[in-house]
Amino acid sequence: MTTMLHRAPDATSFDDGLQLAGLDRIASSRAAGTDLAEGYTGFPIG
């Protein structure tokens, strides 16, 4: 979660692109958002 939400001081433009792609996937996919939520909390949603 930390690497998804915070930019590393030594991040390259490639690293920035990967970070944005990951955030976009979570924001645009219900399945990806559910997977993140379940992994973060340890509880199934539904």
Image: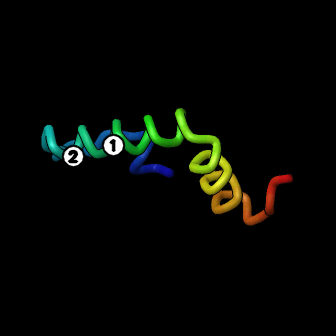
Q: Mark 1 and mark 2 in contact? Answer it, CB < 8 Å.
A: yes
User: In the displayed structure, would residue 3 be above or below residue 17?
Assistant: below
- Depth order, front residue of 16/8: 16
> Where residue 11 sits: x, y (%)?
19, 45
Query: Mark 1 belongs to which amino acid?
Result: Gln
Outermost residue on the right side: it is: 46
> Where residue 19 sits: x, y (%)?
33, 43
Residue 18 vs residue 13: left or right? right
User: At 70% from the left edge and 59% from the top edge, which residue is drawn?
Assistant: 38
User: At 39% from the left edge and 50% from the top edge, which residue is drawn?
Assistant: 3
Outermost residue on the bottom side: it is: 42
Residue 18 vs residue 1: left or right? left
Residue 19 vs residue 41: left or right? left
Q: Secondary structure at mark 1?
A: helix
The quadrant where residue 8 appears: top left
The quadrant where residue 43 appears: bottom right
- Depth order, front residue of 1/43: 43
User: In the displayed structure, would residue 14 be above or below residue 41?
Assistant: above
Label 1 belongs to which residue?
19
Query: Mark 2 belongs to which amino acid?
Result: Asp
Label 2 belongs to which residue?
15
Q: Secondary structure at mark 2?
A: helix
Instruction: Classify 10 Å Cα crowding around label 2: few (below 14), some (14-19), many (20 and above).
Output: few
The quadrant where residue 21 appears: top left
User: At 40% from the left edge and 44% from the top edge, which residue is drawn?
Assistant: 22
> Where residue 6 sits: x, y (%)?
39, 40
Q: How is the image coloured?
A: rainbow
Instruction: Give the alpha-carbon distance from disc 1 to disc 2, as whole Å.
Output: 6 Å
User: At 44% from the left edge and 35% from the top edge, which residue is drawn?
Assistant: 24
